[in-house]
Image (cartoon, rainbow, N blue to C red):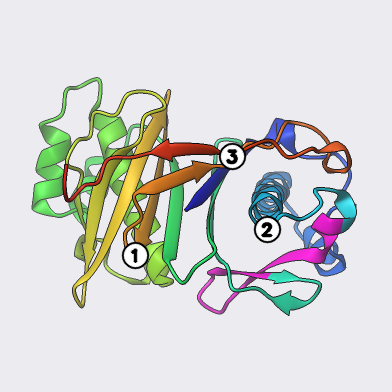
Amino acid sequence: MYWLEQTERDVAVEDDWLSLVETVRLRNMRFPKRRADWRLGRWTAKRGLACCLGLTPDAKTFAQIEIRPTPSGAPEVFIALRQQAVNLSLSHCSGTALCAISLTSTSVGCDLEAAEIRHDAFLADYFTGAEQSCVRNSPASERWRVLALLWSAKESALKALQIGLRLDTRLAVVDLFDAQATDGSWRPFQVSCPNEKLFVGFHSRTSDLVRTIVTTPPRQLLIQLKPPICRPSHTQLQPLERIEVVDPVRG
């Protein structure tokens, strides 16, 4: 399981790395924030895919990589107009984007959330009783981060199911095992969904930003993609960083 995180500062200024269809779609977006978020997501996905697939990381190659939404909204990967056997998930929040990539049949979902104050109705409407207790019993300084983590875990699982928020989020039941992740570390959790669908995932935090990645079947190794920060035409791939994570079943 591979993952890459990028920020708005990493994105090339020009649009020559977008495909023709993507360029047209970008021009039809009215709002600057929507345009910026969309470009950031596509940039992150293309950089990650180029690393995973061993492609030349330049604008010409990136323009041949196209991320298309399915009717469910899940992303599909095309290279030179040919669909690829790649599972991809994307998320963006607060000027940061995250992508998770599987080169196998493994279903994958990822999500980024900012820890922020929420209305009590949000907790009551979208979370199980046990999840609500988990938030309320957390230290005051951690309460909103735990809430963001629970919500992010649900979002990741629903993306992996390719149904999004069409499912009642209370049916995606999160067990965090350990919500107290320190900055940069990955800790396990799992999400139980209808029809005995079980997703195993990992969460980490950086300041007030929470990230989650889930898979099924489970994967016990996350590999961080680490291309240097530069224009794609000047990019040289660096070795991947392998990150061992805790098996949530074995402990």
Instruction: Determine which of the numbered discs, if any, sits on residue 75 in the image.
Output: none
Q: Which residue is mark 2?
A: 53
Q: Which residue is mark 1?
A: 216
Q: Residue at x 37, y 71 (%)?
A: 166
Viewer can see residue 27: no
Q: Amino acid at mark 3?
A: Leu
Q: Amino acid at mark 2?
A: Leu
Tell whether 24 sits left or right of 37: right
Q: Is residue 23 above or below residue 2?
A: below
Which badge, 3 or 1, is on the more N-terminal residue?
Answer: 1
Instruction: Determine which of the numbered discs, if any, sits on residue 240 in the image.
Output: 3
Q: Residue at x 37, y 64 (%)?
A: 158
Q: Amino acid at mark 1?
A: Thr
Badge 2 crowding class, 10 Å Cα cut-off, few under 14, some 14 to 19, many 20 or more, is: few
Which badge, 2 or 1, is on the more N-terminal residue?
Answer: 2
List x then y, in percent, for residue 161. 38, 70
Q: Quadrant of the C terminus?
A: top left
Q: CA distance from mark 3 to mark 1?
A: 23 Å
Query: Over which residues does the magenta segment extend?
Result: 61-77
Q: Are marks 2 and 1 in contact (CB under 8 Å)?
A: no
Which badge, 2 or 3, is on the more N-terminal residue?
Answer: 2
List x then y, in percent, for residue 180. 24, 28
Q: Residue at x 29, y 61 (%)?
A: 199
- Helix, strand, or loop for circle 2? helix
Which of 191/107 is in front? 107
Tell whether 9 sits left or right of 111: right
Image quadrant where residue 24 sits: bottom right
